[in-house]
């Protein structure tokens, strides 16, 4: 695909996310999509699509801004900021994320999000997140809880 088509695909993904439209987001993904981030780890295919569906259904006071970075025929980058109320605690979160994409057959084949889990946990969870959010134990616990939530949602 041409650079402009891949850039349009990234824009479609984030424009859909800004509207809470998981179906629109997931339409940008290849069937075998591989997604990763610090909370959910690596998810493939329907698990990755299910994660976005779960997250979109739980959006509260959500705002998303994004900028598309370098894009070429096979890869792309974006910087995005999600501001929302974390449903588990009612705390306000501003999460700053850098994303990389790999494209195949006109769709996103790989999507990797990177953000500071300690900063996220400090905002989302308050003092426990601030004090423990940097520890491997805490990171594993957050990931385990997120995965359990996703498993329950997918059932």
Image: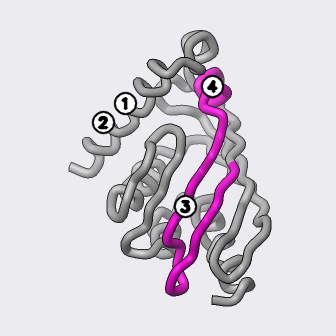
Instruction: Kindly indicate whether the residue at mark 2 contacts the one at mark 1 (C-beta within 8 angstroms).
Output: yes
Q: Tell me the distance, in whole angstroms, between the alpha carbons under discs 1 and 3.
A: 22 Å
Alpha carbon separation for disc pair 2 and 4: 20 Å
Q: Position of residue 103 (x, y in %)?
A: 57, 76
> Which residue occupies 72% across, 60% down?
78
**Which one is earlier in the sequence, the residue at label 2 or at label 4?**
4
Residue at the disc numbered 3? 111
Q: CA distance from mark 1 to mark 2?
A: 5 Å
Q: Which residue is mark 2?
A: 148
For the record, the magenta segment spans 98-122
Picture residue at 66% right of the left edge, 34% below the top: 116
User: If you read the primary sequence from the N terminus, does the residue marked by circle 4 or circle 3 appear first?
Assistant: 3
What is the secondary structure assignment of the residue under circle 4?
helix
- Mark carried by residue 11: none
Q: Is residue 12 left or right of residue 154?
A: right
Spatial CA span between label 4 and label 3:
21 Å
Label 2, secondary structure: give it. Answer: helix
Please name which of the two marks, 1 or 3, marks the residue nearer to the observer: 3
Alpha-carbon distance for marks 3 and 2? Answer: 21 Å
- Residue 143 vertical position relative to residue 45 in the rendered view, above or below: above
The residue labelled by disc 1 is: 145
Spot occupied by residue 87 in the image (x, y as percentages of width and height) = 49, 32
Callout 2–callout 4 Cβ contact below 8 Å? no
Q: Residues within 10 Å of mark 2 (few under 14, many from 20)?
A: few
Residue furthest to the bottom: 2
Q: CA distance from mark 4 to mark 1?
A: 16 Å
Looking at the image, tell me whether mark 4 or mark 1 is earlier in sequence order: 4
**Does the segment drawn in magenta span residue 79?**
no
Question: To which residue does mark 4 refer?
Answer: 118
Q: Position of residue 77 (x, y in %)?
A: 71, 63
């Amino acid at each position: 695909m041409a650079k402009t088509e891949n850039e349009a695909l990234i824009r479609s993904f984030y424009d859909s996310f800004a509207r809470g439209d998981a179906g629109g987001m997931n339409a940008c993904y290849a069937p075998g999509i591989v997604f990763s981030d610090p909370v959910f780890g690596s998810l493939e295919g329907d698990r990755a699509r299910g994660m976005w569906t779960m997250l979109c259904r739980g959006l509260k006071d959500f705002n998303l801004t994004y900028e598309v970075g370098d894009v070429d025929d096979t890869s792309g980058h974006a910087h995005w900021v999600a501001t929302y109320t974390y449903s588990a605690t009612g705390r306000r979160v501003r999460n700053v994320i850098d994303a990389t994409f790999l494209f195949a057959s006109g769709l996103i084949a790989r999507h990797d999000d990177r953000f500071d889990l300690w900063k996220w946990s400090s905002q989302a969870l308050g003092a426990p997140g601030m004090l423990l959010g940097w520890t491997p134990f805490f990171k594993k616990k957050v990931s385990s809880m997120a995965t359990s939530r996703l498993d329950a949602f997918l059932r």
